Image (cartoon, rainbow, N blue to C red):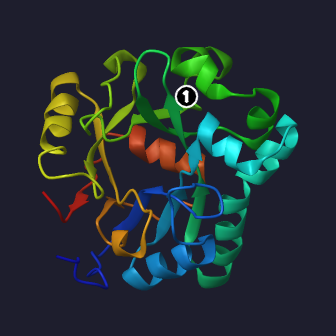
Amino acid sequence: MAPKLPIPPRPGQYLYDTHVHTSEVSPCARVPAREVVRLHQEAGYAGIVITDHYNDWTFETFGLKTWSRIVDRYRVGYETAKEEGDRLGLVVLPGLELTVTKTGYTDFLLLGLEPDFLYNYPYLYEIGIQGIRTLLPSDSLYVIQAHPFRLGVQVADPSLLDAVETYNGGNEAGENPPAEAFAQRHGKRKTSGTDFHHATSIGRGGMWLPERVEDVPALIRVLRSDAELPLRKTVP
């Protein structure tokens, strides 16, 4: 059943979708960035994080040879969404979904990687989370394991994680509860996102924040705080 839209507002709280893909970049996504922004704005979200897929098979679809051009192309989804978000009044923040396959298939949502970092350190899926952490101040990077109990995904070492996506709007029934138990067991922040790929994804996840965050450092600060951040949950 589709979620009822628009989402009723909560006084003093702002709904953010932390897991969003655009068709400009992610091969599996079907909605272009400007439409992604419009759909979220109309549904009642205050902001979104663009987390397009960052992996070798995504980059292969670009057909580009030099790393700087690959990064230029990778950033198109975010930059287009940001432009539209500024026009419509929706906050659009940059993130990425990194796939690491060296020790099993694992997806991570990363916050805090500035453009210069992306240009200077190529092929982050070869470096891995441990390697990335050695390259950045500990307070500037925020690591969320995406949908850790989805079929075929390997659960990460909790010591590498700041948070766990305990609710994913694209998951099958039964895949979210064990993620919530895992986060609870290891004392990790719980997050929720739609895993937006299709128009039907709209409204299926998100996090209620106590303030309207306008940049990634502010989002990381809120996620690291002790504040209770209610999750939007619409499917099993």
Looking at the figure, which quarter contains the C terminus? bottom left
**Residue at 26%, 39% in the rendered image:** 150
Residue shown at 20%/52% (left/top)?
172
Q: Residue at 54% x, 49% y: name it.
A: 218
Q: Residues within 10 Å of mark 1 (few under 14, many from 20)?
A: few
Q: Nearer the viewer, residue 166 or 172?
A: 172
- Measuring from the top left, give residue 113's x and y in whole percent: 65, 38
Q: Is residue 52 above or below residue 152?
A: below
Secondary structure beneath dot 1 equals loop
Spot occupied by residue 211 in the image (x, y as percentages of width and height): 43, 62
Point 34% across, 68% down: residue: 13
Q: Position of residue 26 (x, y in %)?
A: 58, 54
Residue at the disc numbered 1: 139
Look at the picture and state if 234 lies above or below 223. below
Q: Position of residue 182 (x, y in %)?
A: 19, 29
Left or right of residue 63: residue 133: left
Give residue 197's quadrant in the image. Answer: bottom left
Mark 1 residue type: Asp
User: With 164 as the anchor, is 59 left or right in this view?
Assistant: right
